Amino acid sequence: IGSVTGLAWTSVGGALLTVEVTIMSGNGKLSLTGQLGNVMKESAQAALSYLRSSAKKLELSHDFFKGKEIHIHVPEGAIPKDGPSAGITMAMAMYSSISKKPASNNVAMTGEITLTGSILAIGGLNEKLLAAKRNKIETVLIPKENEIDLNEISNKVKDGLKIIPIEKVEDAIPYVFPSVRRKKSSAGRTKKVSKKK
């Protein structure tokens, strides 16, 4: 619970990026560790703001942040990390910790998020998919805006990966959390999205 796998693009290629979230009693503070750059810190703040403003829709307690401190850690602290594409991973790790639902360990994701929960395009998709494949990930969630880039990527990379394009943060939930899958909330919508084109 509170640990979700993302995909990163580094100077030496793609890599898995684990995001861990712990919630403790505190005073409404967001703590970030793991040598995160400014853009990544802003992604974490945007993810938290989205979850707070959408708590009712996501079936989270409306005051989950009250009297609490949320700590986000990205392991391998010696390696500096930056960029906006971990936004969706941070949102899902926080959702996991708040809802106490464990995330599937064979799903990885990448995507910048906005305050309204839209998923924006990212770079390095080919390298990220290669990293997923190398690490035996089965399902990869990517921004819908990057769907067109799949045409440029070799079938050798894509074969064996279930690649799901998503437009909103809530579209990711049924894929990341198997226990939510049976609900009719966003699962039906998400499947339709992934079948387009």
Image (cartoon, rainbow, N blue to C red):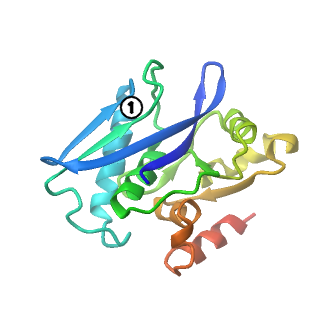
Q: Residue furthest bottom?
A: 184
Residue beneath the point at 72% across and 36% down: 126
Image vertical order of residue 54 relative to residue 158, above or below: below
Q: Residue furthest right?
A: 156
Image vertical order of residue 99 relative to residue 44, above or below: below
* Whole-percent x, y for residue 109 in the image: 58, 48
On the rendered structure, is 108 left or right of 126? left
> Which three-letter amino acid code belongs to the residue tagged 1?
Val
For the C terminus, the image quarter is bottom right
* Whole-percent x, y for residue 142 in the image: 62, 50
For the N terminus, the image quarter is bottom left
Is disc 1 placed on a helix, strand or loop? helix
Residue beneath the point at 50% across and 48% down: 4
Q: In which quarter of the image is residue 87?
A: top left
- Residue 31 visible within the image: yes
On the rendered structure, is 84 left or right of 162? left
* Whole-percent x, y for residue 77 in the image: 43, 23
Residue receiving disc 1 = 39
Residue beneath the point at 35% across and 40% down: 72
Image vertical order of residue 171 relative to residue 44, above or below: below
* Whole-percent x, y for residue 114 in the image: 40, 50
